[in-house]
Image (cartoon, rainbow, N blue to C red):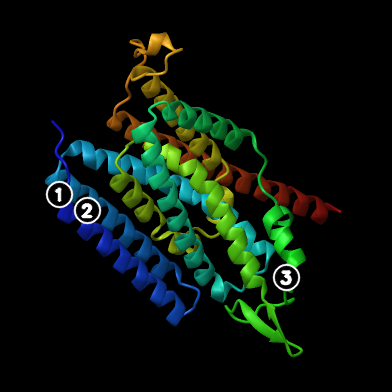
Amino acid sequence: MDLALPLWFEIGSLVLLTLVLVGDLLIVYKRPHVPSMREASLWVVFYVVLALLFALAMLLLADAEHAGQFLAGWLTEYSLSIDNLFVFVIIMARFSVPRKYQQEVLMVGIIIALVLRLIFILLGASLIENFSWIFYIFGAFLLYTAVHQAVAKEPDANEADNAFVKMIRRRLRISPTFDGSKIRTTVMGRRVFTPMLIVFIAIGTTDLVFALDSIPAIFGITTSPFIVFTANVFALMGLRQLYFLLGGLLERLVYLKYGIAFILFFIGVKLVSHALHTNEVPFINGGHGVGWAPEIDTWTSLGVIVVSMAVATIASLIKANRDARARGHSLGEELSLTEKE
């Protein structure tokens, strides 16, 4: 029988995570700078170790099932958060955000993402508790998202403005340049908004789209709101430093989207299978569970997630190295031909 997590642990964890996030936010606003590779690496390692220690605490205080659900959920959200970074890079480039202030933009984006995901988690938990058939909807949505993720073209920096951002541009006076990290500034005696407002809106609306994908995905692994939320928090913590650590490497991870698409497709299948196994919909098998529908356990899910991300990352790096060698070979041939001429 599964053991429940102690209430003191859940409350204490949420308080501790809040303090860490507030501390991180204060560091960004008091000392805006471009973190070095060493600084970014140490912060990313710190947050990863913190997540692993959290999973260990769940193992000791409850059982392996709780720890496994957290790890699978955290890795799923972490992989989807890395996908977020691709869009963040495009938004930063599109609006020419000064590199010195990109940390602040990322931190605001992370806070917006946490608030949105908390709302969706509470809504999703309520739907699951009252309507068991919602798993069919979640599953179908993830299957669609997985296919779209695999076949969709890469976003272009020139197409970063969505409809909402374009509307804001038409309605508000926006200054042509940034004024540090300020949202409002004075130009020729008139108070106007800076492009930083547009950047925040662009990242916030992007976070909304990603929350729609990520929350159904993690509910396919666990239905515990506490595990769902903490997995999201740990996945988003360190995302700011990861942005600077990966840098140009993001462009080399060309197969990452296929790994993420496979994970979403797998969880979509798992959700539909679970919905069939526990079916209560009258027009499906007379409202009874479908016996042949398997229940996919947490550890199988964890294995699929880890292998998918590992294969996608390794394949991407192999392709990047081959492309680099091919470019070097082509350049060598061009130089050789030039010398002969």
Which residue is rendered at x = 34% and y = 73% of the image? 23
Foreground label between 1 and 3: 3
**Residue matched to label 1:** 6
| Label 3 secondary element | loop
Whether residue 66 is visible here, answered yes or no, is yes
| Label 2 secondary element | helix
- Quarter that holds the C terminus: bottom right
Which residue is rendered at x = 35% and y = 50% of the image? 229
Q: Amino acid at mark 3?
A: Leu
3D distance between C-alphas at marks 2 and 3: 43 Å
Q: Amino acid at mark 1?
A: Pro
Question: Which mark, by number, is residue 172?
Answer: 3
Which residue is rendered at x = 63% and y = 57% of the image? 90
| Label 1 secondary element | loop
Q: Amino acid at mark 2?
A: Glu
- The earlier-in-sequence mark between 1 and 3 is 1
User: Few, some or many C-alpha atoms within 10 Å of disc 3 (few <14, some 14-19, many ≥20)?
Assistant: few
**Residue matched to label 2:** 10
